[in-house]
Image (cartoon, helix red, strand yellow):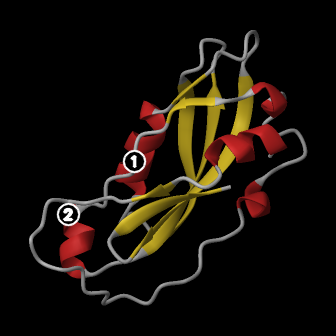
Amino acid sequence: MKHAFAAALAAVALTGCVGSDKPFVPRSDYGLPPNPRDYVQPDDCEGGSRLAALELTEPEYPGRAFRRGLQGWVALRLDVSADGRTRNVEVVAAEPVDAFNGAARATVRSWRFEPPGEPGITRCVVVLDYRLGSGRIGF
């Protein structure tokens, strides 16, 4: 992943409150999230030096996962179109499988970036980390 993309996502600590008045009680084993670079291929995120975030929506902690005390992470690959919108968002790995996938995809689909111009930027990798009732972005 290019450094500018990482800088655009760096230091974004997010809280994913689900509106529960009960405290989050971790009940699942939690594997540390992977380094996004583990999923980056040589041609991924080409042109990332031109990518700057305009809107990064906070990830929502899924209510069902919150109530069950689940923690985990989701690694996603995405493209950024010439107009700065995310496209082709796909889950490449997750732990636990499927617990956070839908929420993670919805979050990333809502992101907007400064338009990078034609032809856009392809195959950027990001990890959303769901821990202790909050969500974080890893780069």
Residue hosting label 1: 58
Residue 57 makes an appearance in the image:
yes
**Residue 15, horizontal then vertical, whole percent:** 36, 60
The kind of secondary structure element at disc 1 is loop
**Nearer mark to the viewer, of 1 and 2:** 1
Question: Which residue does the image show at 12% across and 67% down from the upper left?
Answer: 20
**Where residue 95 is drawn, which disc sits there?**
none
Label 2 crowd (10 A; few <14 / some 14-19 / many >=20): some
**Residue 12, horizontal then vertical, whole percent:** 54, 53
- Say whether residue 130 is left or right of residue 81: left
Residue hosting label 2: 63
Q: In this view, does 58 lie above or below 13?
A: above
Q: Which of marks 1 and 2 is nearer the N terminus?
A: 1
Question: Which residue does the image show at 64% across and 26% down from the upper left?
Answer: 80
Mark 1 is on which residue type? Glu
**Residue 95, horizontal then vertical, whole percent:** 49, 73
Question: Which residue does the image show at 31% across and 61% down from the upper left?
Answer: 61
**Residue 47, horizontal then vertical, whole percent:** 83, 27
Q: Distance between the residues labelled 1 and 2?
A: 15 Å
Q: In this view, does 92 lie above or below 122?
A: below
